[in-house]
Amino acid sequence: MSAENPNRDSFFHLHLVSDATGETLINVGRAACAQYASVRAIEHVYPLVRSMKQLERVLSEIEGNPGIVLYTLVDAELRGCLKRRCAELGVPVLSVLAPVVRLFQSYLGGEPTPRVGGQHALDTDYFKRIDALNYTVMHDDGQMVDDLEEADVVLLGVSRTSKTPTSIYLANRGIKTANIPLVPNVPLPGHLESLKKPLIVGLVASPERIVEIRQNRLLGLNAMDAAGTYTDRDAVREEITFARRLCSRNNWPIIDVTRRSIEETAANVVALFHERQRRATNGN
């Protein structure tokens, strides 16, 4: 049995075999798939594969739907069995961490000490992320503004600029994030402009993009009759102008999210956050 040829078909099977959560494999697999816009990957994710019995079920799936196999398995016996069976089936198989570990080993010397799910250890960083997530959820959409000084980042933006998902993404990086909507005729927290600790970032987008997203949202809620100025292009343009002027007056950085994914927006915020930390450390 041989793998399907993605040059002939519009899809292929992608098997992701992990002895942990599989998040690393999913991210790597999707990043690679993004380079082939005309081909769709059908993902088969197998997390927590830690016994031969579990692996046999995975191999049965691979045999039934041959395709590319990526894995992160610490156990040598499981790795060997997976590679042998994939060779017999004629499907490509790769450990996504092995080349990286070999590079580390060549530089650091010595042998690595493999740990199943080691990247998810309950260490200080883990609890920092949990703390950040708790804070971020409680400070979503303008809630609990009295303790904004405890935030690492405060995101400002008009409705539909992806404030909440960006905040959650940042929290998963251990960054306490509050987000505050800029709503016409609704006053902002009085102490917002006097905050010292948090990095405050404004999120904006083009009026056309905001109107499109808002219209789709109202259609989904079957509430187009209640649109009013919410989807009026001139009103939206005024909202965005207000947001830009507010940020400009306070020297807060602005990120235009019109053509950015959540990940790209968050990466930009992280870069601004680290730059601010660096300057504070250097006394600038």
Image (cartoon, rainbow, N blue to C red):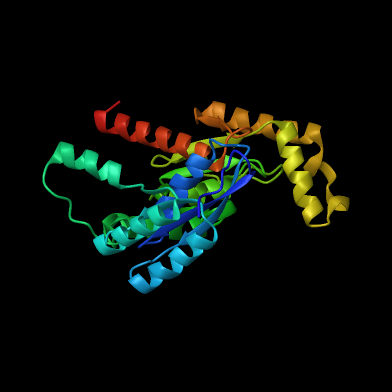
Task: Establish if 109 lies above or below 276.
Answer: below
Q: Residue 131: in sight, yes or no?
A: no
Task: Establish if 79 lies above or below 37.
Answer: below
Q: Residue 249: in sight, yes or no?
A: yes
- Drawn side of residue 65 relative to residue 186, left or right: left
The x and y percentages for residue 16 are: 45, 55
- Drawn side of residue 263 relative to residue 270, left or right: right
Residue at the extreme right of the image, as rendered:
225
The x and y percentages for residue 233 are: 80, 34
Quick one: 195 or 154, which is closer to the camera?
A: 154
Quick one: 267 or 1, which is closer to the camera?
A: 1
- Drawn side of residue 246 relative to residue 150, left or right: right
Tell me the residue at 31%/58% (across/down): 79
Image quarter in which the C terminus is found: top left
Quick one: 228 or 192, which is closer to the camera?
A: 228
Task: Establish if 280 lies above or below 46.
Answer: above
Tell me the residue at 53%/42% (across/down): 33
Tell me the residue at 48%/40% (across/down): 32
The x and y percentages for residue 189 are: 56, 47
Tell me the residue at 54%/30% (across/down): 254
The x and y percentages for residue 212 are: 76, 40
